[in-house]
Image (spheres, rainbow, N blue to C red):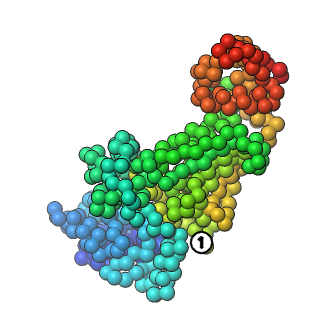
Amino acid sequence: MILKESETLELKKSTAELKEAVISIAAILNKHGKGRVYFGVKNDGTPVGQQIGDATLREVSRTISEHIEPKVYPTVKFHVMDDKPCILVEFDGEDSPYFAYGRAYMRVADEDRQLAPGAIERLMARKRRYRSGWEGEASDAPVAAVGTQVVRRFVRRANDAGRMSYRYDNARDVLHKLGLLRGRSLLNAGRVLFCPDNSAEVQAAVFAGTDKLTFLDIRSFRGNLFDLIEKSETYLKEHIDWRADLSGSRRKEIPEVPVRALREAIINSLCHRDFSNPKGNEVAVFKDRIEIYNPGRFPEDYSPGDFIKGGERSILRNPMIAHAFYLTSDIERWGSGLRRIHEACREAGVKVEFRNLKSGFVVIFRRKPPAALYHSAVDKTVGKTVVKTSERIVALLKASPALTVPELAKLTKLSRRGVEWNLRQLRMQGRLKRVGGRKTGSWEISG
């Protein structure tokens, strides 16, 4: 493999050029947020090797950490190229502008150019406008307020994802390592991540039409952010339409909107919300669309298209919260969330829109026409017969009118709330009627 210097790659002949490498790291971080440096490779890509003693890797790591502000903690490891011992440094960061030896630099092609004061101020002003600083403030919650099992589960998931090397000892140690403590108090980020009692809330609702005049169901979810993700995802899964692919040897349930796109949008909305705003997040199901809203405006001077195309790196309103989500593999870095939503919907043939509102940001998934929601359908393009969830319930009740909600839930593999929602929809359409009492009655099909 022949290496070539670029805006994200720097080559150094030896660690004698360590200071220059530190400057390159800061410059690359300010431009792209991540990159690599090799020691033991000439700038034309020829490996020449590097003498590596017991303390060499530690010295490289220490020098980088001590001379770049804000702090950067790179991965420094032994690497062999063409049988030559080299050092590979991999680094990333979301807290620009970065300063090396007290000065800020920007990567341009394969050069490191010092930033003028005006350029530095623009970078800092942009960050101040987007970040509220709320997550880094001390809360009034002590460490004892965290849910111990939530922290244990977090560490286990981060270990399984390969993004955290230490195991659970106690909650305080974990929070300290994550930088979520100030003295005896949790930072606001730690509180919303791990405490059941916090300011985070998600409003969830199902509306009868295309506006908010009449709702069929409304809920308010509270809890730590990881719980809010699961509750919001479950709610949407229970209130969207599903079809069954019966063409193969095994039944396959297919949602009208890809679940991975819904989950990505939920996580994105919590990760990037403005927590200083008392308004909560929202998930809403309308007759023609699904909306996932967060009270946090999109970064100034950017559009969703900048990130969908993959040309821009991530801009984080809440880097501490985002880092926790990254460790558990709930998100990836580098602004790829919107792109993954877009791609998942494109593959499923679902229209998705991203709108920057004056009050925040909303992801809109367009549903199929209402007339198609309650009938069996044949996908002529692939010859697969698909049956709507409500039609499965109707068929089951035609065969056994006395089936109970728990029995329907078991047969359809829906949750109890999911079955109840479908029954309510069928009754509103006039297709289903309850005859007799709750325990001894039965269902009467009228259509």
Q: Is residue 305 above or below residue 198?
A: below
* In the displayed structure image, the side of residue 354 where residue 144 appears, left or right: left
Q: Is residue 362 above or below residue 428?
A: below
| Towards the viewer: 82 or 192 | 192
User: What x and y, as percent, mark residue 104?
Assistant: 40, 81
The quarter in which the N terminus is drawn is: bottom left
Mark 1 lies on a secondary structure that is loop
| Towards the viewer: 171 or 127 | 171
* In the displayed structure image, the side of residue 334 where residue 360 appears, left or right: right
* In the displayed structure image, the side of residue 361 where residue 333 appears, left or right: left
* Residue at screen point 43% across, 51% down: 193
User: What x and y, as percent, mark residue 62?
Assistant: 24, 68
Q: Residues within 10 Å of mark 1 (few under 14, many from 20)?
A: few
* In the displayed structure image, the side of residue 290 where residue 318 appears, left or right: left
User: What x and y, as percent, mark residue 429?
Assistant: 81, 30
* Residue at screen point 52% across, 42% down: 230
* Residue at screen point 60% across, 65% down: 298
User: What x and y, as percent, mark residue 67?
Assistant: 29, 75
* Residue at screen point 61% across, 51% down: 282
Circle 1 is placed at which residue position?
Answer: 300
Query: What is the number of callouts on the image?
Result: 1
Q: Is residue 119 above or below residue 212?
A: below
Q: Is residue 223 visible?
A: yes
The quarter in which the C terminus is drawn is: top right
Residue type at the position of mark 1 = Glu
